[in-house]
Amino acid sequence: NAELEASLGLEHGWIERRTGIRSRRWAGPDETLSTMAEQAGDMALATGGVSRDAVGLVLLATSTPDHPLPPTAPLVAHRLGLRAGAVDLAGACTGFVSAMALADAFVRRHDKAALVIAANILSRRINPSERSSAILFADAAGAVVLAPSDEDDQGVLGASLASDGSGYDLIRIPAGGSNRPFAADVDIAETRMTITDGREVFVRAVEMMSACSREALSDASLASHEISRFVPHQANARIISAVARNLCIDGDRVIATIADYGNSSAATIPLSLSLSHAAAPLQRGEKLLLAAAGAGMIAGALVFGV
């Protein structure tokens, strides 16, 4: 924070007061999205004890792939020794939730395991002079392995995915796509992330995460008091608190990692799951609620049975 506050001309403590973030991690110069995703995937496979031959699908939720083309997931799968299908999923902050819903359906239909990875190096896509985005974003990777189960109360028990394209331009990278390709006359700042209305993003994110969470709970025939851990996207501390209040989920059941790790978009939920599991191992029978909202505007939530 001190480095960012100095570069942006902010007083000491300003970032933490506004966002709840005290620190964040940025990738080193030799790290790439694929190397971070590979490390997370390898850790998940080892922790889960799942044979690599049993994995039929790799989904990589990212907004910062190694290259615009080819997709990064096949490279990650290759490095992990997997011959599974491999797909990049560009779902912004909701990418992990969407990927989990899709992977769960794949596992149930094909009786094969799926590896879901979410990773981002957002430090290379922010505009260091734009305060609203520069103070938030971080780099991280996290992964989960979903394996077949005969138990009805395991896996995704309820889900809700939503979008509101009227907020399409609230968080964006203006240039670099087919709409405005890279060109000599394109300002480098237009290839970096910008948030056009932070207040509107806050309002919509709270509304959409709350609504999707309620729908996912209803789909699972569960009430919020039956959720043991609420793992929201770590957008900022105020959004997390507002959604938890709307859902009547006590603070001791809310997994919050934003203070030390910042906002790494889709990677925040699997990172938070990993940190929470390390602190208090997940127990059979626990019910988790995951929720996210972000650029697009896209939102989603799911209830997961351990």
Image: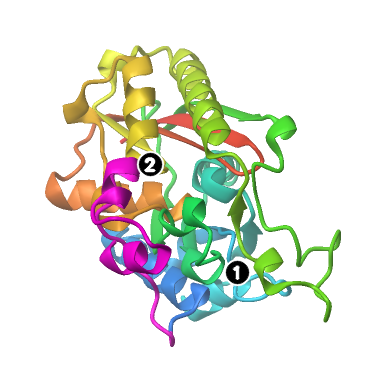
What mark, if any, has residue 236 been given in the picture?
2
Extreme residue toward the bottom, this view: 30
Could you classify mark 1 by the number of other residues whose Cα lies within 10 Å: few (under 14), some (14-19), or many (20 or more)? many
Extreme residue toward the left, this view: 280
Could you tell me the amino acid type at mark 2?
A: Asn
Quarter that holds the N terminus: bottom left
Q: Nearer the viewer, mark 1 or mark 2?
A: 2
In depth, the one of 306 and 208 nearer the eye is 208
Residue at 22 percent across and 35 percent down: it is 284
Could you tell me the amino acid type at mark 1?
A: Pro
The answer to whether 263 appears left or right of 64 in the picture is left
> What kind of element bears circle 1?
loop
Give the spatial CA distance, label 1 vs label 2.
24 Å
Residue at 83 percent across and 77 percent down: it is 185
Question: Which residue, given by chain and number where applicable, does mark 1 sit on?
Answer: 65
Q: Say if the magenta span includes residue 45.
A: no
In the image, is residue 107 above or below residue 199?
below
Could you classify mark 2 by the number of other residues whose Cα lies within 10 Å: few (under 14), some (14-19), or many (20 or more)? many
The answer to whether 147 appears left or right of 20 in the picture is right
Q: Which residues are magenta?
A: 1-30
What mark, if any, has residue 172 been given in the picture?
none
Q: Are marks 1 and 2 in contact (CB under 8 Å)?
A: no
User: Residue 98: image x %, image y %?
Assistant: 56, 41
Q: Can the viewer see residue 161 in this picture? A: yes
User: Residue 296: image x %, image y %?
Assistant: 66, 41
User: Residue 72: image x %, image y %?
Assistant: 61, 71
User: Residue 199: image x %, image y %?
Assistant: 52, 33
Residue at 42 percent across and 43 percent down: it is 235
